[in-house]
Amino acid sequence: MPMPLVRDRLVPALIGFSGTLHRRNLVGASEATARAALAAVAECRLAARDRAAAESNFQDMLDAARRLFADRPNPCSAQALSGIGRVRMESGNAAQAAEYMTRTLDVHRRLYPNRDHPDLATSMNNVAFAYERIGRAAEAESLYRQALEMRRRCFKGPHPEVAHSLANLAWCLRRLGRPDESEPLFAQSLDMTRQLNIGDHFDLATSLFELASIRLSLGRATDAAPLAEQAVAMAERLLPGDHPRLKEYRDFLATCRALATPPEDRRNLWPH
């Protein structure tokens, strides 16, 4: 319970602070601090699922950026547009989310012309995610590939964003009906996630589950079951016993074990 308690105290403080700065019209020495405060409040509210309030804060950021920078590309506008896009996505409006994410990508392309930048790669990834949800999977694949390659150039060696990009592209290919192409990407993502996390970690449990899932879909239940067992064991150490994700993993493991068992022995897996 400590995190909600901290958030409950932090959000009102940030709201009051940003309101004071907003009354100063976000100018002078307080301008950068005010933008940071608005962003912090918006992120806290989005985390608390207060979407209307979060979008209002992101809109305040966007309006302030327009006053300060006019039509010039700037990180504040990009952050605000991306924030509104995330709110719309969480509200179930993928089409509007795609519009805001595309505008964010345009700002980042103008900010970083002809060069790599982690924010540009993230914008590509976000647009791809939104495109998948509105039936534009082929365009999403292209953007996921561009984001992956840019992140590989930005981050030398294992990096969480590269591992996430590998998994994102793998899921896209799976949804496009190309599981044979997605399986090695899930394997690469798991290998990198293992290098990045010593011991238990949610990302590692997720990567284990993802690779197990694709291998099961390819008819490789015997290969999937050990990965599923590792995912369940790790999730049991990380999550409370009644967590829905843990139930999902356990049910999946039962399916893997059933399909990996010869038909004549499957009756022993179930209670009589």
Image (spheres, grey):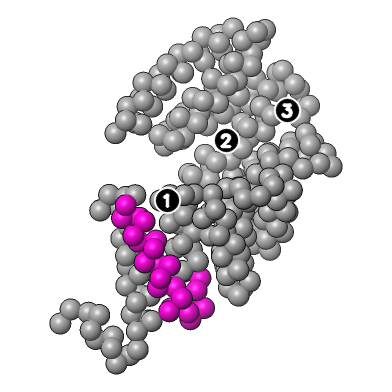
**Secondary structure category for the residue under label 3:** loop
Dot 1: few (<14), some (14–19), or many (≥20) neighbours within 10 Å?
Answer: few
* Viewer can see residue 130: no
User: As rendered, which of 245 and 66 lies closer to the eye?
Assistant: 245
Query: Mark 3 is on which residue type?
Result: Asn
Quadrant showing the N terminus:
top left
Q: Which residue is mark 2?
A: 83
Pick whichever of labels 3 and 1 is earlier in the sequence.
Answer: 3
- Residue at 39% x, 61% y is 231
Q: Which residues are magenta?
A: 213-237
Q: Which residue is mark 3?
A: 74
Circle 3 or circle 1, nearest the eye:
1
Q: Is residue 2 one of those drawn in magenta?
A: no
**Secondary structure category for the residue under label 1:** loop
Measure the C-alpha gap from mark 3 to mark 2. Answer: 15 Å
Query: Mark 2 is on which residue type?
Result: Gly
| Left or right: 188 in relation to 104 | left
Q: Which residue is mark 1?
A: 199
Q: Position of residue 190 (x, y in %)?
A: 53, 60
Cβ atoms under marks 2 and 1 closer than 8 Å: no
Query: Mark 1 is on which residue type?
Result: Gly
Q: Is residue 232 one of those drawn in magenta?
A: yes
- Residue at 35% x, 89% y is 262
Q: Is residue 100 above or below residue 187?
A: above
